[in-house]
Structure formats: structure tokens, C-alpha cells
Image: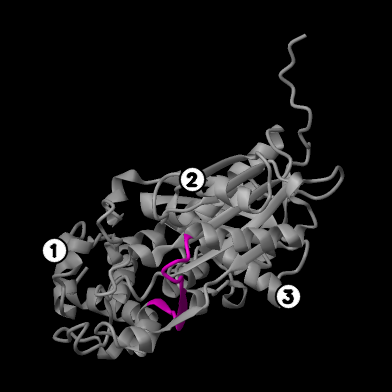
Amino acid sequence: MTDQEILAGLGEIVEEIAGVPADEVTPNKSFVEDLDIDSLSMVEIAVAAQDKFGVEIPDDQLKDLATVQDVVNFVAKNSEGSA
Amino acid sequence: MRSFTPPFAPAGGARILSFGGYQPGNVLTNDDLAAMVDTSDEWIRSRVGIVSRRVAGPDESVTDMAVVAAGKALAASGLSPADIDLVIVATCSTEGSLPNVSAIVAYRLGIVAPGAYDINAACAGFCYALASASDSIRAGSARHVLVIGAEKMTAWIDFTDRSTCIIFADGAGAAVVGPVPDGEPPGIGPVVWGSAGDMGHNITIADRDSFLWQEGQTVFRWATTAMHPIAAQACERAGIEVSDLAVFVPHQANLRIIESIARKLGVPRERLADDIVHAGNTSSASIPLALSRMAERGDLKPGSAALLLGFGAGLCYAAQVITVP
């Protein structure tokens, strides 16, 4: 998976769960500050990301993922077969 | 000659005959809470879906609330106190640990010398108690059982902790359970129950001087990922399709949790009980309280199938399908 593919997939997830248009889910956006996503929605996004990318994001790690790019990096780093 | 065959053991098992519920008179709104802690009506509605909840008075005990709810259920059943031979109370918020609530409830309702015990399976308690009542009747250990969920959660809440004080509330709900007459359809389906003690540290009241504490995100994740398969399994064991359920009554934990479970289970929103909006999270009381309020409003169709799902501290969970009385 490329970062672009992860970003696109994450955008779909955020749109479905939080109703934020996928094209607004850009790398530098903060989930809480810019996208107005609360802690429970972040859990739902983490669960959906696990289903989509096969990467588990535990709660203690989730707290440190503030921006879209943080999640993309986490998924890229932890996904199987990543370069 | 020695015989261990019970004198009565209905082949058809047990069914629910009636419901009863009680909510304390004191209404606590989101605006009331916003005056106490840093929160707002909008914040509470969006996080947990609660608009208002009820709080017991300082002199109102778990037992007091249980007596009122159980008395209503007993009256609605048409039975007399003498017909009840077992009383089970699910609770996790009693003021003290002795005497148990069930024996005192029985005494105050004029039920003479029934079997009486309390169980603590936290928010799953009512479903555990209902399963135990059903099994007792099926086995011939009891003929009619009074099953109650009663909680004074606010006695264990820190009203300076905005993550918990917005959620929990007080109340009681009860059901009278009796045998299924020969030839009638079954009343209480097989229970699917279990626990995850490895996650027990995520919801605690650590000791008598502590308040209720929970790791909200972890519990949210568990409830929204692990519970819909349990609910689906309860339907499967009862031989019913999810699409044939008239109503899904999960523990009223948090509106977002139960909407998520319903969505994943395939239950349409209009068939999801959402009593939490005006009752808050009353732990083991939430399911029978929701059922009793729906019955009062005429929202329960007699003979239809309802799916119950309790889940919470332990972490414990239980689900079963019932036929609505």
C-alpha cells in the first residue's frame, strides 16, 4: 500500500463514520482541531481502519495519532508487506 | 423410595408474564450538569445521546426502588405474592453488602419465605438473572420468579468527573417469570453469556471509598466490536432471524454504542430501544426499565420477539430472545 492509497482509504472511512467529506481529509489536518472528530469517533475510525488495512491501532497508540498523516504513517509502518 | 424428579418442571420452559418499572422523581438535565462540571447539553447529546436522567433522593435506596418496580410487575402479572417462590435482584450499587436486597424486597411485598439472592454481573445483570430464573423454572426449582434490576449508580459517581457523571443514573425494572403452559410457544430463549476478566480493570468501583471509573475508549471499542456477534448468536440459538425481531433492547449504555451494535447486527434504527435518552445509564435496571416503559406506552406487541443484550463491567455479557408478554 502506498501512502496515497492509505490516505484515500482513510478518507472514505472518515466520511462514512464522521460525515466529513473525504476530500477534506488531507495529511496536515488534525482530527480533533480541524475535522471536529471526537474520541469515540476516533475509536470507530481505528476499528474501521483495522478492517480495511489489517492494521490494529491500540487505544494507547491511538491517543498519539493527532493528524491524518500520523495515521497514514502508522498504517504504512505496521501493514504487512510494506516496504 | 428416593426420587430426584421435581414435582413440577414445565416442558415448555419459562416465559415473562409482565414488566414493571420505577424512576425516581428528581430529573437531572444536561443543563443542570453543565452548571456543575465543564460540559454542555450539545457535548453530552453528541457523546452519549442522553437528554435527561433521574436521580434517587438521599433517603431512597436500591431496595426502595426495587420494591416499587417489582410491586408493579407483580400487580400486572395478576399473581399474588403467595405465587412467587424465588426473588432474584441484579444490582451492583447497593449501599451496603448485607442483608441482600432480594430478601428485603420479598418481605416488603408480602412474599413469604421465597428463595432470594442478589447477583452482580453489572450492566449484564438483568440478562443473567432472567436466564437463572428461566433455568430454575425449567428445572423445577421454582414456579414463579420475580426478577429485578435495581441501581442507585449516582451513589458511586463523582459529580466532578464529567466523563462519568453525565452517563449514569438511578432506577429499577422488574419482570415476573412463570411456566409456559403446555402447547404454548416458548417464552425465553437460550442465553448466550460470557465474560472477559482480562479486561476487568477497564470498569471499576475499586473499594467502598471509590467512585465508578471507566476507560471509556476501551469499553467503547469492546462494546462496538465484540457484542453484535453475541447478539447474533442469541438469535441463532433461539431459531430466529434478526429481521424477525420486533425490537432490540440492549443495555442502555450510551446511544452511540447501541446504535453501532444495532447497525452491525442489521437491526433498523426504529426497532432499537433508546430509553437512555430520558433515563440515562441505569446499569442492570436499564433493560427491564426500558421494557416496562415501552409496555406502558403500548410499544410492545404481545407475542412478538424481543432481543435483550446486557454488557458491562466484568467485563460480563449475556443475550437472549424473549417473547413479549
Q: Which region of the structure is painted magenta? A: B48-61
Residue holding disc 2: B100
Query: Which one is nearer the viewer's eye here, B217 or B164?
Result: B164
Residue with the most extreme top position: B1
Q: Position of residue B246 (x, y in %)?
A: 68, 67
Query: Which one is nearer the viewer's eye here, B122 or B35?
Result: B35
Query: Disc 2: which chain?
Result: B
User: Looking at the picture, does residue B1 appear above or below residue B239?
Assistant: above
Residue holding disc 1: A77
Secondary element at image label 2: loop
Q: CA distance from mark 3 to mark 1?
A: 55 Å
Q: Position of residue A7 (x, y in %)?
A: 23, 78
Q: CA distance from mark 3 to mark 2?
A: 34 Å
Instruction: Tell me the kind of residue under disc 2.
Output: Asn
Is label 3 or label 1 in front? Answer: 3
Query: Disc 3: which chain?
Result: B
Instruction: Tell me the kind of residue under disc 3.
Output: Gly
Residue holding disc 3: B298
Q: Position of residue B224 (x, y in %)?
A: 41, 64
User: Looking at the picture, does residue B128 appear above or below residue A44?
Assistant: above
Q: Would you identify the image quadrant in which residue B183 lies?
A: top right
Query: Which one is nearer the viewer's eye here, B89 or A47?
Result: B89
Residues tagged 3 and 1 counted as in contact (Cβ below 8 A): no
Q: CA distance from mark 1 to mark 2?
A: 54 Å
Q: Would you identify the image quadrant in which residue B112 lies?
A: top right
User: Looking at the picture, does residue B267 appear above or below residue B1?
Assistant: below
Majority secondary structure of magenta residues: loop
B122 sits left or right of B11 in the view: left
